[in-house]
Image: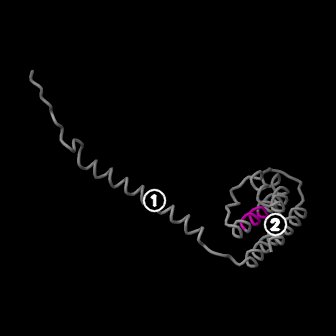
Amino acid sequence: MNVSVELMDPLQYHPFLMVLLVLLSAWMIGILVRDYLKKRQKKKAGKVDKQKVIDACLALLNEAEKEPDRRIAHQKISKALREAYGKLNGIEAGEMTLRELRHLDKKLYRAVAVCYEPEFAKFSNADTKEALQKAREACESWN
């Protein structure tokens, strides 16, 4: 009985495609490593000056108070609170839902809850004064 085996070349594919595949893989790994290092660097950012963050938040709230459009005012209030809380605690609160905020800080939750409906509604009769009052209380409580 005669048995024969045909061996294939190690690179049966076109060498250009193999080089392209290696370069593409290296590029993807580089992107993943870069993103990982950026996230790690953000966590190591260190301590922030609480008073500066709170003052900046209050300044943004004062700016929102002057906004004639109620919807935009509520959006600015919510954004200012979420950013300040995020800077103080190292948490991305800007992307959290209202349900997720409930577990972080009660005053933050109450202030954002007042803004939530007018922030997403096309038309709203919500008062910005109540939202600003709760927002200032929440912001000052972090001091």
- Circle nearer the viewer, 1 or 2: 1
7 sits left or right of 43 in the view: left
x and y, in percent, of residue 42 in the image: 59, 68
When the figure is inspected, residue 112 is found, relative to residue 8, above or below; the finding is below
Q: Mark 1 points at which residue?
A: 31
Amino acid type assigned to the residue bearing label 1 in the image: Ile
Q: Quadrant of residue 60?
A: bottom right
Q: What is the secondary structure assignment of the residue under circle 1? A: helix
- Bin the neighbour count of mark 1 within 10 Å (Cα to Cα): few under 14, some 14-19, many 20 and up: few
**Would you say residue 17 sits in the magenta stretch?**
no
Q: State the extent of the magenta-drawn residues as a range.
A: 76-83
x and y, in percent, of residue 56 in the image: 75, 75
Residue at the outermost front position:
1
x and y, in percent, of residue 35 in the image: 51, 61
Residue at the outermost left position:
2
In front of the other: 33 or 18: 33
Of the image marks 1 and 2, the number of the one nearer the N terminus: 1
Q: Mark 2 points at which residue?
A: 67
Q: In which quarter of the image is residue 61?
A: bottom right
The residues tagged by marks 1 and 2 sit, at their Cα atoms, a distance apart of 40 Å
When the figure is inspected, residue 56 is found, relative to residue 97, above or below; the finding is below
Which quadrant holds the C terminus? bottom right
66 sits left or right of 9 in the view: right
Mark count: 2
